[in-house]
Amino acid sequence: MKRFFLAHLLVLGFAFVCSAGTRPLEEDQAVTIIIGPLVDDTGAALTALNVANIDCNLYKNNGTKVDVQLEASGTSNDCVHVEDGYYSLELTATETSTPGYLRITFQISGALLFHEDFTVLPSNTYDSDIAGTDKRQVDVQRFGGASTALSIAAGRKSTSRTFPAIKVPLTTQRSCSQPTSPPTIIRPPTSGM
């Protein structure tokens, strides 16, 4: 049960960190991403674009707009057709320097306006949640109602607790001499909703 709870907590945590419909990127890291498909107004994939003519803009979380000059090769923003209208695009560490939401737009004559959405995560968050190569950094701000300037032991509450008795239905109780078969679960009748 504990593993089930932790797995759901991790999934919910990732869903919170990475907005719906976005892909994660690591902050301050150069990366090559796949974008697309770029299509014309009939829905046909555009496979032979002159990438230097694509108007590409980045919109960062802090409201900054960055114009990106795409080239076929030899620059920090190489953009190359891969297959069926999908393109490989290099982003620099400067372009992924602002944590949070990042939108990249692409516009070229004869193609529909296209955009991709990303969530730029701090390195520790990316490494722990996405890459699995690190553990999440957690700092204690307050413990037991006291600031961290106090010792944690001084702020610790008593660990001796009593819990109310749990009443188990007779159909699930077993004695030591009974076989260890699973208990019979009696479910109430469902209403025809």
Image (cartoon, rainbow, N blue to C red):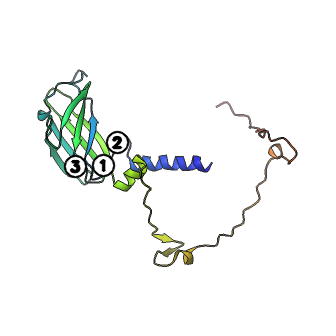
Task: Return the disc, 1 or 2, that comes first in the chain's sequence.
Answer: 2
Callout 1 amino acid:
Tyr
Residue 158's disc number? none
**In front of the other: 129 or 44:** 129
- Toward the left, the furthest residue is 53
What residue lies at 69% left-to-right and 67% top-to-bottom?
Answer: 161
Q: Residues within 10 Å of mark 3 (few under 14, many from 20)?
A: some
What residue lies at 15% left-to-right and 38% top-to-bottom?
Answer: 70
Label 3, label 1: how many angstroms apart (C-alpha)?
A: 12 Å
Instruction: Identify the residue position indicated by label 2 in the image.
Output: 22
Asked whether the beta carbons under mark 1 and mark 2 sit within 8 Å of each other, the answer is yes
Instruction: Identify the residue position indicated by label 3 in the image.
Output: 95
Camera-near label (2 vs 3) is 3
Q: In the picture shown, does residue 192 fall above or below 24?
A: above
Instruction: Identify the residue position indicated by label 1 in the image.
Output: 101
Secondary structure state at the residue bearing disc 2: loop
Image coords of residue 101 (percent x, y)? 30, 49
Callout 3 amino acid:
Glu
What residue lies at 55% left-to-right and 50% top-to-bottom?
Answer: 6
What residue lies at 24% left-to-right and 21% top-to-bottom?
Answer: 44
Label 1, label 2: how many angstroms apart (C-alpha)?
A: 8 Å
Callout 2 amino acid:
Thr
Task: Return the disc, 2 or 3, that comes first in the chain's sequence.
Answer: 2
Image coords of residue 75 (percent x, y)? 14, 42
Image coords of residue 13 (percent x, y)? 46, 50
**In front of the other: 190 or 24:** 24
Q: In the picture shown, does residue 178 fall above or below 162?
A: above
